[in-house]
Amino acid sequence: MAEIKKDIQKQPASAAQETEWTRSRQVYTPKVDIYETKDAIVMLADMPGIDEQSANVTLEKGVLTIQGNAIPETYKNKSIAYYEYDWGDYHRAFTLSDEVDKDKIEASVKNGVLKLVLHKAKQAKAKKIQITKE
Amino acid sequence: MFEPTIWRFGRTAQPWREMQRLQNEVNRLFSGASQAVGQDYPPINIWMGQDDLIVTAEIPGVKVENIDISVIGDRLTLNGYREIISLKEGESYHRQERNYGPFSRTLQLPFNVNATKVDAKYDKGILTITLPRAEEDKPKKIAIKSE
């Protein structure tokens, strides 16, 4: 496979660079929905256990990173008897194209769902070109 | 028969590029992002106390009025519905990984519950239900008389 790769000039973008973590907590990939409206791209990510303080959205070099640290549940005088889910950190990164206006990104959290509204850049919006008669 | 040189010409099909794309797609599938629901939904945790227990469930993005909790004896039933986003005309999905629709789950608890004192709250996408043990179900200490 390695030899064949050399023959191809361009490579389709692969997943964002994977990095390792120094914290001992489990890292989860939140499930996302992405849909496009007339003038924005909306992203919804399921991140139960996070609020506006524990969520983090950063944009660096065209890579949008969503992060969240769920606070572990603890209850006084109770011990865990059965568990199916764990608390941990959320992390996922997306490469943004030029059509997104990078200065106009809205983020909000409601009921453990992070919502990002990425407004489209001016030039990405369809422009009607006037045709003149010669 | 198929020597690599044949693929040097740009006009021929390039199956490995397609394979690479497929591989990336499969990798994304297994990264946990689009995990199929193999278990009961919603996932729950149970915390045991002396005379009560707490059940927590991860249900992000559901309206409180769409969650229904009922307790009968030692059975706790969670019913709910997650609304699908209705897209307007001209809007389209790029990716859809989150689940929608109704869910239902019944748990058998280790004791009968005092249904009138059940307390539930929904915060940050986590439902927390506190279930106290019914008075008549509590173990009774029996005093031993010495003769």
Image: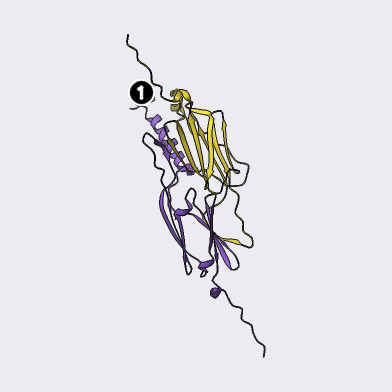
On the picture, is A22 further left or further right than A82?
right
Q: Image quarter for residue B2? A: top left
Q: Which residue is labeled 1 in the image? A: B6
Dot 1 falls on which chain? B
Q: In this view, does B147 lie above or below B50?
A: below
Q: Name the foreground residue: B7 vs B52.
A: B52
Residue in the foreground of this view, choosing between B68 and A22 = B68
Direction right: furthest residue? B146
Q: Colour of chain A?
A: yellow
**Looking at the picture, how far across and down is residue A41, in whole percent?**
46, 34
Residue A68 locus on image (x, y percent): 57, 43
Residue A46, x across and y down, in percent: 50, 45
Is residue B22 visible to the viewer in this orientation of the structure? yes
Q: Where is residue A109 in the image (x, y as percent from the top left)?
A: 54, 43
Tell me the shade of chain B.
purple
The amino acid at mark 1 is Ile
Q: From the image, which quarter does the N terminus of chain A lie in?
A: top left
The residue shown at (32%, 11%) is A133
